[in-house]
Image (spheres, helix red, strand yellow):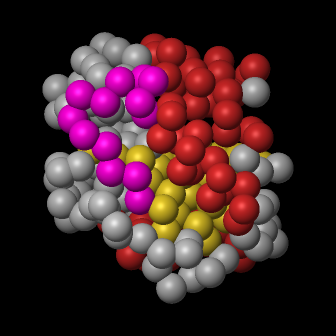
């Protein structure tokens, strides 16, 4: 339904499980759009936790309030969400779920269309937010991987990715 031709994160998760012997994997999706395809792929798989922070209501219209289960954590956020609100939601809802799940690997759908300058998304996130998210990722599992997802301000995108990598380096 969306912008992805292939479910790159799902492919990475299955590769890690089948070829690298990883058991429990958490998918952390911070793209502005709900990761409905990734959620659907892993809906009945207790070895994968899917957690998505996304703008809602917004395309594709899924991941709304109350949608989720034991291995699906949807955190719908309003347009205009700022760094503080986003990071508070991450701290209060996503981090506890991931810690309780105890993944061996976290795979991040690292979308940057939630940035304030993005022409598609409606959130108000800054490079500081992405740096902080990057800083927190290593504490969520012994291993982590990030997959570049959305981000349509091509001038700002390199700086947003760099901020995340800087955060990872200090985490």
- Image quadrant holding the C terminus, namely top right
Residue drawn 67% across the image and 34% down it: 136
Q: Is residue 70 above or below residue 3?
A: below
Task: Tell me where residue 132 appears, x and y as whole percent.
Answer: 59, 24
Q: Residue furthest bottom?
A: 44
Q: Position of 137 compared to 23: left or right?
A: left
Q: Is residue 100 above or below residue 118?
A: below
Q: Is residue 136 above or below residue 13?
A: above
- Image quadrant holding the N terminus, namely bottom left
In front here: 160 or 55? Answer: 55
**How many numbered circles are shown?**
0
* Residue 24 shows in this picture: yes
In front here: 88 or 163? Answer: 88
Q: Magenta stretch containing residue 148, yes or no?
A: no
Residue drawn 33% across the image and 51% down it: 76
The quadrant in which residue 31 appears is top left
* Residue 105 shows in this picture: no
Residue drawn 17% across the image and 49% down it: 58
Q: Position of 101 compared to 90: left or right?
A: right
Task: Tell me where residue 84 appears, x and y as whole percent.
Answer: 45, 24
Q: Magenta stretch containing residue 75, yes or no?
A: yes
Q: Position of 119 compared to 67: left or right?
A: left
Task: Tell me where residue 15 appears, x and y as whole percent.
Answer: 65, 68
Residue drawn 76% across the image and 51% down it: 141
Please state the extent of the stretch shown in magenta in the rendering.
74-86
């Amino acid at each position: 339904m969306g912008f992805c031709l292939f479910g790159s994160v799902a492919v990475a998760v299955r590769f890690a499980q089948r070829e690298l012997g990883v058991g429990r994997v958490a998918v952390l999706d911070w793209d502005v759009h709900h990761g409905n395809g990734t959620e659907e792929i892993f809906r009945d798989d207790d070895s994968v936790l899917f957690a998505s922070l996304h703008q809602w209501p917004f395309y594709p219209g899924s991941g709304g309030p109350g949608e989720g289960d034991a291995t699906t954590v949807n955190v719908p956020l309003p347009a205009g969400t700022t760094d503080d609100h986003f990071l508070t939601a991450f701290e209060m809802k996503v981090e506890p779920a991931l810690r309780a799940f105890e993944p061996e690997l976290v795979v991040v759908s690292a979308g940057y269309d939630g940035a304030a300058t993005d022409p598609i998304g409606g959130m108000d996130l800054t490079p500081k937010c992405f740096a902080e998210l990057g800083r927190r990722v290593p504490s969520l599992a012994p291993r982590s991987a990030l997959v570049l997802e959305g981000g349509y301000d091509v001038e700002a995108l390199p700086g947003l990715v760099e901020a995340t990598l800087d955060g990872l380096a200090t985490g």
